[in-house]
Image (cartoon, helix red, strand yellow):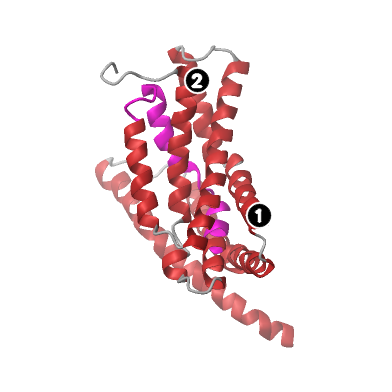
Amino acid sequence: MQEAIAVIPLIRKFLRRLGDALRDLLPIIVVIVAFQLMVLRQPIPNVAETLVGGLFVVLGLTFFVQGLEMGLFPIGEAMANAFARKGSLTWLLFFGFLLGFSTTVAEPALIAIAGKAADVAAEAGYIAADASSQSSYALQLRLTVALSVGVAVVLGIFRILRGWPVQYLIIGGYAVIVLMTFVAPEAIVGIAFDSGGVTTSTVTVPLATALGVGLATSIRGRDPLVDGFGMIALASLTPMMLVMVLGILRFGLRVPGTG
């Protein structure tokens, strides 16, 4: 009886999350249906499959958000507190780097971007148009982006420990990126910016955020609201730099004004 009573709050929380997911997805549904019926003036294809798919999306989003709150956020904060109590900066930085690298290298969106970039590079003649060369190029892109996210997490940890203002790092980083766009190979610039957008995966974001907030909470004089956030912004910034560096190393500098 007590176990059943203990489950009731979880059920209520899940139902509340389900309602939140429906509310969040409702504008998307309204836009799609309105344009399909009023602008395109065509019936919705495969209505049954569309409804089932929409139900899966709602349930998936509900379970995902609930899982973040129950699992990933608590474990991230708990590990940050444990590292802070242990007082080992080396292990903390090593864990942060591996966290960023391992969760990014397997990110499906990054794999898709890297594969498409390899195809386009082969068609443009930048690399050999064979499977081995394209696979090697795509792997290099993935490893470069994963390495950059690992470095970003390490930099984010240092920022929290030292109390560095995040705006200076972000502004300075984007200033460097803008300057690099003038000398990096033109074909790599767009890939670099897209890489910055797909780096942070569904596991990296909650764990890295929880790690930052947990560290800021554990360190005296740090404000979790001010110092605990910003790591994801760094994780989106560093891939742009390193991907352009990869392009420069592989294809050489582009002379400004030559296109």
- Disc 1: which residue: 90
Within 10 angstroms of label 1, few (less than 14), some, or many (20 or more) residues? few
Answer left or right for 180 relative to 38: right
Relative to 225, say whether 237 is above or below: above
Quarter of the image with the C terminus in it: top left
Q: Along the line of sight, which residue is nearer the eye, 60 or 119?
A: 119
Q: Mark 1: which amino acid?
A: Thr
Relative to 255, say whether 67 is above or below: below
Helix, strand, or loop for circle 2? Answer: helix
Q: CA distance from mark 2 to mark 1?
A: 33 Å
102 in magenta: no
Relative to 53, say whether 87 is above or below: below
Residue located farthest toward the front when viewing the structure as drawn: 162
- Disc 2: which residue: 250
Answer left or right for 88 relative to 237: right
Residue, x 54% and y 45% (percent of image)? Answer: 151
User: Bounds of the magenta span?
Assistant: 181-210
The image shows residue 83 at horizontal and vertical percentages of: 66, 64
199 in magenta: yes
Q: Mark 2: which amino acid?
A: Arg
Answer left or right for 1 relative to 259: right
> What is the number of the mark on residue 65?
none
The image shows residue 148 at horizontal and vertical percentages of: 52, 41
Q: Along the line of sight, which residue is nearer the eye, 171 or 76?
A: 171
Answer left or right for 239 relative to 99: left
Helix, strand, or loop for circle 1? Answer: helix
